[in-house]
């Protein structure tokens, strides 16, 4: 309930805070590193190429509860890896789109105290989660 509302509020908080999501490169770096770890784990576990790992991960992100992860994976890979949800490929060409969307997804989960989503985000993006919390501390 109110997922989209709090996601959009997250964008407002990001802007009102002086573009918190990309004030430093640390959040984006953490997002990339965390996702790379997931992809590498899939490649090793299933003995597949990167593109095959993207397909496997994308298939695992079809459920509604993974909509934020699906969107962020799309942003990290130019939509080569994504589940059912995400932005159009061209959207990710915009300046700082990844950081802005990831910030809004994290914000929405925490604002709604969605324990399941926070857990999922924390499993896939553990260091990005820490960077997000640092951004909120100011």
Image (tube, rainbow, N blue to C red):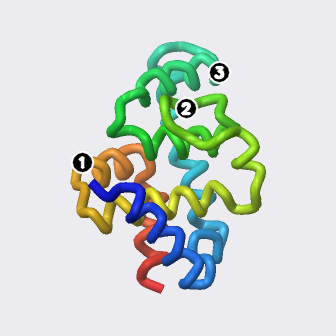
Label drawn at residue 19 = none
The numbered mark, 1 or 3, whose residue comes first in the sequence reads 3
Residue in the image at 46% along x and 42% along y: 69
Q: CA distance from mark 1 to mark 3?
A: 28 Å
Image: 96 above or below 77 = below
Residue in the image at 64% along x and 70% along y: 22
| Residues at circles 1 and 3 in contact by the CB criterion of under 8 Å | no
| Residues at circles 2 and 3 in contact by the CB criterion of under 8 Å | no
- The image position of residue 81, as x and y in percent, is 59, 30
Q: Which residue is mark 2?
A: 82
The numbered mark, 2 or 1, whose residue comes first in the sequence reads 2
Closest to the observer: 66 or 130? Answer: 66
Image: 93 above or below 82 = below
Image: 67 above or below 18 = above
Neighbour tally class for label 2: few under 14, some 14-19, many 20 plus, Cα within 10 Å: many
- The image position of residue 100, as x and y in percent, is 59, 63
Q: Disc 1 vs disc 3: which is toward the camera?
A: 1
- The image position of residue 73, as x and y in percent, is 55, 40
Q: Which residue is mark 3?
A: 51
- Is residue 35 visible in this depiction of the protein? yes
Neighbour tally class for label 3: few under 14, some 14-19, many 20 plus, Cα within 10 Å: few
Label drawn at residue 116 = 1
Q: CA distance from mark 2 to mark 1?
A: 20 Å
- Is residue 37 visible in this depiction of the protein? no
Q: Disc 2 vs disc 3: which is toward the camera?
A: 2
> Dot 2 lies on which element?
loop
The numbered mark, 2 or 3, whose residue comes first in the sequence reads 3
Residue in the image at 65% along x and 21% along y: 51
Corner quadrant of residue 114 = bottom left
> Dot 3 lies on which element?
helix
Corner quadrant of residue 6 = bottom left
Q: CA distance from mark 2 to mark 3?
A: 12 Å
């Amino acid at each position: 309930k109110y997922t989209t509302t709090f996601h959009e509020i997250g964008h407002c908080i990001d802007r009102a805070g002086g573009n918190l999501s990309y004030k430093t490169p640390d959040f984006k770096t953490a997002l990339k590193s965390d996702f790379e770890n997931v992809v590498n784990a899939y490649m090793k576990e299933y003995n597949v190429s990167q593109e095959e790992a993207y397909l496997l991960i994308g298939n695992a992100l079809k459920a509604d509860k993974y909509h934020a992860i699906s969107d962020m994976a799309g942003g990290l890979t130019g939509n080569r890896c994504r589940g059912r949800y995400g932005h159009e490929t061209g959207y990710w060409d915009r300046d700082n789109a990844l950081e802005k969307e990831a910030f809004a997804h994290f914000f929405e989960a925490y604002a709604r105290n969605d324990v399941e989503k926070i857990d999922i985000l924390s499993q896939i993006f553990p260091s990005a989660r820490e960077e997000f919390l640092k951004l909120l501390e100011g």
